[in-house]
Structures are given as structure tokens and as C-alpha cells.
């Protein structure tokens, strides 16, 4: 996977969080990704902010973040493991039939 491919995955993940993150935090993360190329730093902070602010994470957002983290080889990082548990705790259980 090229750097451009990874950057594209991070851009998709970041864009999916535009309506979830407070505007200042979104712009900080956007700058780290697009101006400085600090994809990992941005995603680590985003995951921390999600936990600190108890922000909702939907399936599409989780999938986008998981894809970006996997592209960097961080699918099993401590933050990604935490995000996976957080997402599962937020997800409603399927209704019994």
C-alpha cells in the first residue's frame, strides 16, 4: 500500500468523524493529516478524544478508522483494541425474534 493509499484511508476516516468531533478538534486532526502527514498522531488523538468526550461512533466511522489503522499496521494497537471495545459497548444488541 502506498503512502497515498494510506493518506486516502485516513482522509476517509477523518471525514467520517466531521460531524462527531468538536470543530476545533476536527480541524486540529485535519491539519495533522493533511498539512504535516501525521496520520498516526491524528488517529491516536481522535481515539483519545472519543473516549475523553464519550463521543458516539457509528459502524461506518468505526470501519473507516479500523481500515486506516490496519493500513498502518496498527489494527491491534492498544488504542484500536480500546476503540473496538468502546464501539461494541455502544452498539445495541440485536433484538430477539
Image: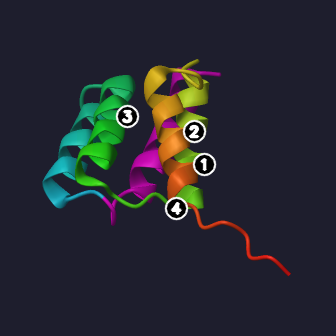
**Earlier residue among tags 3 and 1:** 3
- Per the image, is 60 magenta? no
Q: Residues within 10 Å of mark 3 (few under 14, many from 20)?
A: many
Q: Secondary structure at mark 3?
A: helix
Q: Which residues are magenta?
A: 1-20
Horizontal side of residue 59 vs 14, given as left or right:
right
In the picture of the structure, the residue carrying the numbered disc 1 is 63
Residue nearest the viewer, comparing 93 with 18: 93
Q: Secondary structure at mark 4?
A: loop
Q: CA distance from mark 2 to mark 4?
A: 12 Å
Q: Residue at x 33, y 57 (%)?
A: 55
Q: Which mark is residue 66?
A: 2
Q: CA distance from mark 4 to mark 3?
A: 16 Å
In the rendered image, residue 78, in percent from the top left (x then y), is placed at: 46, 22
Residue nearest the viewer, comparing 2 with 89: 89
**Earlier residue among tags 4 and 3:** 3
In the rendered image, residue 32, in percent from the top left (x then y), is placed at: 25, 32
* Pointer 1 with pointer 2, Cβ within 8 A: yes
Q: CA distance from mark 1 to mark 4?
A: 9 Å
Q: Is residue 23 above or below residue 28?
A: below
**What is the count of numbered marks?**
4
Q: Residue at x 52, y 61 (%)?
A: 58
Q: CA distance from mark 3 to mark 1?
A: 13 Å
Q: Is residue 92 above or below residue 15?
A: below
**Earlier residue among tags 2 and 3:** 3
Q: CA distance from mark 1 to mark 2?
A: 5 Å
In the picture of the structure, the residue carrying the numbered disc 4 is 58
Amino acid at each position: 500500500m502506498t503512502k497515498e493509499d494510506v493518506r486516502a484511508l485516513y482522509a476517509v476516516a477523518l471525514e467520517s468523524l466531521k460531524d462527531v468531533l468538536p470543530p476545533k478538534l476536527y480541524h486540529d486532526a485535519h491539519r495533522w493529516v493533511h498539512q504535516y502527514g501525521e496520520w498516526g498522531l491524528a488517529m491516536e488523538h481522535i481515539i483519545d478524544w472519543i473516549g475523553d468526550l464519550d463521543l458516539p461512533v457509528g459502524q461506518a466511522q468505526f470501519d473507516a478508522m479500523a481500515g486506516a489503522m490496519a493500513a498502518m499496521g496498527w489494527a491491534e494497537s492498544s488504542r484500536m483494541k480500546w476503540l473496538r471495545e468502546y464501539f461494541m459497548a455502544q452498539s445495541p444488541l440485536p433484538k430477539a425474534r
